[in-house]
Amino acid sequence: MTEFLQQIINGISLGSVYALISIGYTMVYGIIKLINFAHCDIFMVGAYTGYFAITTLRLGFIPALFFSMAVCALLGVVIERVAYKPLRNSAKETLLITTIGVELFLQNIIKTKALAGPNVLNFPEVIPTATFKIGGLQFSNIQLITLGISVIMCAALQFLISKTNTGRAMRATSYDRDAAALMGININRIISVTFAIGSALAATGGIVFGMLYPKLEPIMGVMPGLKAFVAAVLGGIGIVPGAMVGGLSIGLIETLSKVYISSGLSDAIAFIILIIILLVKPTGLFGKRNVKV
Amino acid sequence: MKKNVFAKMGCTILSLVLTAAMVTGCSSSKSSSDGGKEESAEIVIGGVFPLTGDIPGIGSAMENGAKLAVADINAAGGVLGKTLKLISEDDQNQASVAPNAISKLIDQDKVAGVVGTYASSCSIPMATIAKERGIPMISIASTNEKVTQEGGGYVFRACFIDPLQGKVGAQFALQKLSAAKAAMLYDKSQDYCVGIADKFKTNFNEGGGEVVFDETYNRGDSDFKALLTKIAGLNVDVLYLPDNYSTVGLIAKQARELGITCAILGSDSWSDPGLVTVGGSAVEGCYFTDHVSFETDNPKVKEFAEKYKSQFGSEPSGFSVLSYEAVLLMANAIEKAGSTDSSAIVDALKATDMEGLASNYKFDSDNNPIKSVVINQVKDGKFVFAEEIQPE
């Protein structure tokens, strides 16, 4: 029983990282209807930026987090302006392929000697790990911080989208871009803001991931990114709380299937879930039936 | 309208420039290969290394070792009176990229032989190509048995093989660590990991111990807590992790966090300073089977280490030595063969009796060298010699 509860803790800890990446994914999709595959690589850049902020600039955890969020927000906006905006009115597939192009570009540019170099880097222990034991269960402060950050980010994002003017403009843009423009909404600004927020969330995910699994490499974003994508679809792509729940669910499913079904099949199971959802309820757990996709 | 015209012009110019670049690119590469043939003042060999990907540290250690060997050979007069030249290719440590790397070396660069590469899952498809094209190949560090088996006589290697490594690991765990219960955790997609884990299990069970946990993970995983939590409940004496240094560092760290205090044992792919970079204090005290120890009285190894440090500014790894020796083996065989004819080189390789850096080379009937296994331990972040086990 203790072991089962410990596995639940492991699953939630893993899931909170997926959730953090997933809410950024889902927000960009929700507003712009674009699956941004480069999202997981902005996550990677976020982790690297955090690394340099902590080691070279000697910043603490919170300043490094904000620094990395700012750098990635800027990067997100630049990528959108340079690579996606010129294609905004072309076919969806073109844009989708461009996001993959950006993904490969980011993975390979970070490997160059001028940036991080090809070697694996070790994320510094910016907050000393402390392990707590309660009745045979073990968890660390890092795991708690991860979960806390995911929940806070999710709540803040939900508040931003549903309660603020910017959020209303985002929703209007999502619903009908041309009509929103006619109502005086600056579409370019709203899309930039969306990418800035999405990328800042990815940066947060990157730093948290670096603290939990201190191995930085250019392809570190790929697998978590794919899982986060499944999580976003599971929760209903475009729906922020759905992504949170989806992320935690995928973390739990992955952990429990590793332990109780087969360690080798855990990834396969995560992706089978994606296929089942797409077949049975394409709008996801939280999706409305009449959602416009 | 005007804007469109400019855009079109821009496109035309860009495409012209690109075409020009392609044409010049082609012509220059052509002239270099033709030049090699006409003058034939050079003997070209190819090298395949994992220069990028998940283990670039090992890749550059290997390439540097090979470069040193070429420099030393040329300083001593070259091969057959000609200069030896090495052309490096990157396999990204991916089985899908490695075949292209060796094909390019054979077709475009017309190499006399190939040294490389690191991962068994890359060397196996390369061996198939070497056999088909009849080009001699020396795998540097691929320990899976299949590498030379797939090579149909054309493929050799500079390292020991997994059955020996798995056996030595199991014996060490049983005798020196007095382990009775062992757990294994490895990457199921790597021939190397699967082959070695299999041999460890057989030998550990036959030697009176019991492998109580045998599970795998996927390539690219970062979270191992689910499986490690299971292991923590089993009270094993030794945890066997035959995988690359970068992954192992993470596993060891998470194992220690979950309160697994038992000894951790690994294989030769731990042998990179990156192990300590990622694993930190978690890998302190761990043992692994390796090819070379730098804590030795062997003057050749010492001299090599110093030369390497002064030239590349970093510490060499065991793979640098193997890579150096692989180039030496190839050059030695070409010299003995008296030409770059591949069957003559293969015959010369089979009859090899050469003094390398760390060991003497003689191949058995399966083209595998007969050599010893070293066991190193991580102490204060450095790899310290623990034991050397001779082959039977």
Image: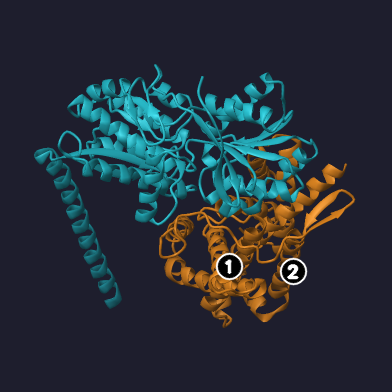
Residue A94 in sight here: no
- Secondary structure of residue under mark 2: helix
Residue with the most extreme top position? B365
Q: Is residue B154 left or right of residue B201?
A: left
Per the image, the residue denoted by label 1 is A50
Residue at (67% x, 73% y) in the render = A62
**Quadrant of the rendered image containing residue A24:** bottom right
Residue sitting at 43 percent across and 70 percent down?
A82
Q: Which mark's residue is nearer the viewer, 1 or 2?
A: 1
Q: Colour of chain B?
A: cyan
Task: Name the spot of residue B83 as percent of width and height, x first.
Answer: 18, 41
Q: Nearer the viewer, residue A177 or B80?
A: B80
- Say which element carries label 1: helix
Taking the view exactly as shown, the residue that stands out farthest to the bottom is A184
x, y percent for residue A273: 68, 43
Q: Colour of chain A?
A: orange
Q: Is residue A200 above or below residue B336?
A: below
- Left or right: residue B325 compared with residue B284: left
